[in-house]
Image: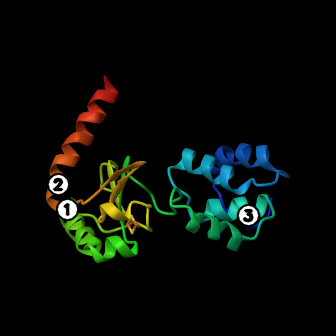
Amino acid sequence: MTTETSILEGELQARLQPIVERYRGKRGAVIPVLQEIQGVLGYLPRKALIFVATELSIPLAEIYSVVSFYSQFSTVPVGRHRLEVCTGTACYVKGSHQLLEELGEKLNLEPGQVSPDGRLSLATTRCVGACSMAPVLKIGEELYGEFTADKIEQLLGSLARREEADRE
Ligand code: FES
């Protein structure tokens, strides 16, 4: 084990090692490895990225460029519902920064934070390809166009009902 990989604690290494082993020596491994690790941990902490870089002999900078290019990846913990405000140009012009601020106040979260109960997290994202509906809020794979902060209570209610239905 190298010094770099030893930054992982035993349990974490035990969970990630089988994933990297499946992709060792394979081309195009970075994205699927990161997807699997994010599936296990919920996000991609720096030490996991260093572990992947070291184990698969890929420059850490290359891994970071993949992580920052694809909005599906997050290097910060995320809630069960990840609320992402688009800050692309069209959304910016339509007030996405104000939306982000208002959502932050209503949810008591800064961008990059997760609520104490782990249900919600707030983040920004680059253009999600729905500029005609700006400003856009993205939750998981769903897009909510022309979104304003006063719609948040209704949206939180529908997320809660969905969670309840999932539990039944
Ligand atoms: S800029 Fe927000 S969807 Fe394109």
N-terminal of the pair, mark 1 or mark 3, is 3
Q: Is residue 37 left or right of residue 162?
A: right
The residue that mark 2 highlights is 151
Name the residue: 55% across, 45% down.
39
Count of marks placed on residues: 3
Distance of label 2 from label 1 (alpha carbons) = 6 Å
- Amino acid at circle 3: Ala
Circle 1/circle 3 CB separation < 8 Å: no
- Tell me the element at label 1: loop
Corner quadrant of residue 51: bottom right
Q: Considering only vertical position in the picture, is 103 above or below 13?
A: below
In front: label 2 or label 3: 2
Q: Nearer the viewer, residue 150 or 9?
A: 150
- Amino acid at circle 2: Lys
Q: Position of residue 5 (x, y in %)?
A: 73, 61
**Callout 2: CB less than 8 Å from ligand 1:** no
The residue that mark 3 highlights is 53
Residue sitting at the far right: 25
Indicate the quadrant containing the C terminus: top left, top right, bottom left or bottom right: top left
Indicate the quadrant containing the N terminus: top left, top right, bottom left or bottom right: bottom right
- Tell me the element at label 2: helix
Q: Nearer the viewer, residue 64 or 6?
A: 64
Q: Position of residue 72 (x, y in %)?
A: 52, 56
Label drawn at residue 148: 1
- Amino acid at circle 1: Thr
Mark 3, other Cα within 10 Å: few <14 / some 14–19 / many ≥20? many
**Callout 3: CB less than 8 Å from ligand 1:** no
Q: Quadrant of ligand 1?
A: bottom left
Label drawn at residue 28: none
Q: Position of residue 128 (x, y in %)?
A: 44, 61
- Tell me the element at label 3: helix
Circle 2/circle 1 CB separation < 8 Å: yes
